[in-house]
Image (tube, rainbow, N blue to C red):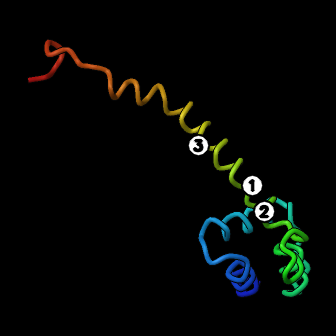
Amino acid sequence: MKNYLLTLLQQCSEEQFGQDAVEYAIVSGAVTLTYDLETDLRTIMGQPGKPETGQYDAICEAYQRVCRDLEQQTAEVMQPLIEEILRPVSLARQIP
């Protein structure tokens, strides 16, 4: 199964982002694999010469939204820590 997934991901995209997007779609259940390489490639990438029949663009857009949301949540959580790190420290409070 591992080799199958690696082969599928590599054939869907040569770029890491595309592979990550397809992997996320599989793991999240947005794409259900049949474990028939040609069928799964056509589901994801579309019919040969007709990429609009596949889900690849929608998969990449959805993954991009997930990444943006995660970045935003991380920034919100880290903001108090960043503010504390950047807060000036009084020289009187410094330990000799």
Picture layout, residue 56 above or below residue 84:
below
Residue matched to label 2: 57
Residue of label 3: 71
Q: Secondary structure at mark 3?
A: helix
Q: Nearer the viewer, mark 3 or mark 1?
A: 1
Please name the residue that numbered disc 1 is placed on. 61
Direction from residue 91 to residue 71 in the image, left or right: right
Mark 1 and mark 2: Cα distance apart in space: 6 Å
Out of 90 and 37, give the one closest to the viewer.
37
Q: Quadrant of residue 72?
A: top right
Q: Are marks 1 and 2 in contact (CB under 8 Å)?
A: yes
SS assignment at label 1: helix
| Quarter of the view holding residue 28 | bottom right
Q: Position of residue 16 (x, y in %)?
A: 59, 70
Specify which label sits upstream in the sequence, 2 or 3: 2
Q: Residue at x 85, y 66 (%)?
A: 55
- Of residue 53 and residue 66, the one placed in the foreground of this image is 53
Residue 63 is situated, as x and y percent measured from the top left of the image, at 72, 55
Kind of residue sitting beneath label 3: Glu
- The label nearer to you, 2 versus 3, is 2
The correct choice, above or below, for 96 with respect to 53 in the image is above
Graded by Cα atoms within 10 Å as few (under 14), some (14 to 19) or many (20 or more), the crowding at tag 3 reads: few
Helix, strand or loop for disc 2: helix
* Residue 41: % across, % down: 83, 80
| Residue at x-position 71% and y-position 77% | 9
Amino acid type at circle 1 is Glu
Q: Quadrant of residue 87?
A: top left
Q: Residues within 10 Å of mark 2 (few under 14, many from 20)?
A: some
Q: Residue at x 73, y 77 (%)?
A: 12
